[in-house]
Structures are given as structure tokens and as C-alpha cells.
Amino acid sequence: MAKTSPPVRSRPVRSRGMRGPALVAGAVALLGGLTACGDGAATNAPRPTAADRATATDGPAPTGRGTGSPTPSPPQAAAESPTAGDTAASASSSARTDGRCHSSELRARVGRVDPGAGQRNFPVVLTNVSDRTCTLYGYPGTAFVDASGRQLGPDPRRAPSAPETVTLTPGASAWSGLSFASPEISGARAATPDALLVTPPDERNSLEVHWTAGEVPVGGNESTVSVTALAPGTGP
């Protein structure tokens, strides 16, 4: 008797055609997720700065050469600005090297009278009392004043003469002739001054010399007082 085979149960058959689209769809979804993750990282990353872009494209930042903007130098004002001590030293140096004798470096005196033909002549002497060599050129300023400092008579006039540069070493002197007609002879109005003010050439500060030579003319037609240009020495 022939053996009968057991009945075969039927199983649902899955279509192979459905597996391909499902796999493709899953791959697309996975790729989309990866792409989304990549886009998020790029969005959250810090943006490159202008310096980063310049470094990436042009190399190192400019250093002041070529077409780059110059790099500012460190401030040096404090090192170059003169201090008060430097300014004082500079002024002192200028005073000692400009050549001209200053009032503070001179002493004035009036020499002995030299009378002659109704005239009274006096040497006005300027002596270098500083420790440097300096020069004088031209006429000194002179004026008679009373005890209160008020000027007596007009300014003396400059007698015709040829000025020369007088070089004074320490202790050396220069002189100018101060002359006027004797008031007793000329009949000019006279006064006895307290002092003679002497101003060195190109200076503003006067040197005061006590006057002991009596009356001087201060008014009238014969009251002219004259001075000559400075010359080396202490007088005739």
C-alpha cells in the first residue's frame, strides 16, 4: 500500500518586489538624517572672521610694508619731551654761547673827568665780570636820573663814530665817551643827578652807576649830551 504524504500547509508568500522599494526608502531616510546632521553642524559652527579670511586667502596679516596699513609705532613722547631741567639747561647754554655780553655779565663805572675847552668828558666803562668771553657792538644807552628814578634831561645823542665789535675776555673792558658842555660856561639849565643808567647794546636791563661829578645840563639850547660807540679799553 502506498504511503500517503502529509498535507503541505501553505505560507503567505512575501513579494520580492516590495523589498526593493522598502530598502530604497530606508536608505533615503538614513541619508536624509545624515544630511540633516551635517547641515546642523555647519550652521552652529562660528563664522570665520575677516582676519581668518585674510589669513586663509592672503597669508599673514600686513606688517606695514607693501600695501598693508602701517603698524603704529610705540609712543615716544615721554622719552622725547624735554623736562624742566632740560629746558633750563638749554636756556643757560644759549645764554653762554650766543656771543653777546648780557647786562648780568657786566659791571659799569664812570671814569675820571677829562676837561677841555669848556667840555666835560667822561669814559663810561663796561667790564666783563663773567667767566666767558663775550662781545659788545655799538653804542650804550645812557640816562641821568634823580633819586626817585626820574630821568633828567633828554636822551643823550650818538656822536658820529665807526662802531666795531669789541671782544671781552673775562676781566676785559670797553668804554664809551660821555661828553657835554660845562653848564657854568654854556648857561644851560642844570641839575645834579643821583645816578647814571647805562644799558649795554641790545640789552634792556640797565646798570646803575652812582653819579658824583656834579651838575649836568638838562635843558636849554646848550644841554646836549653825547656818547660815542664802544671801543676796547678803559678810556684815553
Image (spheres, rainbow, N blue to C red):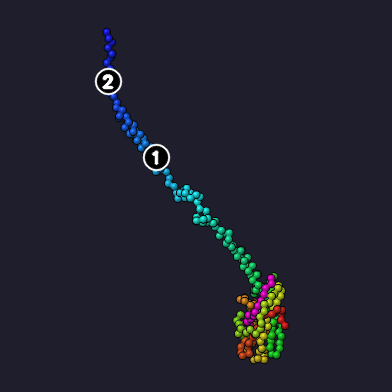
Given residues 6 and 125, the one toward you in this image is 6
In the image, residue 101 above or below residue 12: below
User: Residue 22: which numbered mark, if any?
Assistant: none
The reply to whether callout 2 and callout 1 are in contact (CB within 8 Å) is no
The quadrant the N terminus occupies is: top left
Given residues 122 and 169, the one toward you in this image is 169
Is 111 part of what is drawn in magenta?
A: no
Residue annotated with mark 2: 10
* Secondary structure at numbered mark 1: helix
Q: Which of the 4 image quadrants contains residue 172?
A: bottom right
Closer mark to the observer between disc 2 and disc 1: 2
Check disc 2 and give the amino acid type.
Ser
**What's the residue at 42%, 46% (across, down)?**
47
Given residues 224 and 78, the one toward you in this image is 78
From the viewer's perspective, tell me whether residue 177 is left or right of residue 74: right
Check disc 1 and give the amino acid type.
Gly
Which stretch did the figure color magenta?
A: 132-146
Q: Position of residue 170 (x, y in %)?
A: 71, 72
Q: Position of residue 50 (x, y in %)?
A: 45, 50
Q: Position of residue 97 (x, y in %)?
A: 65, 70
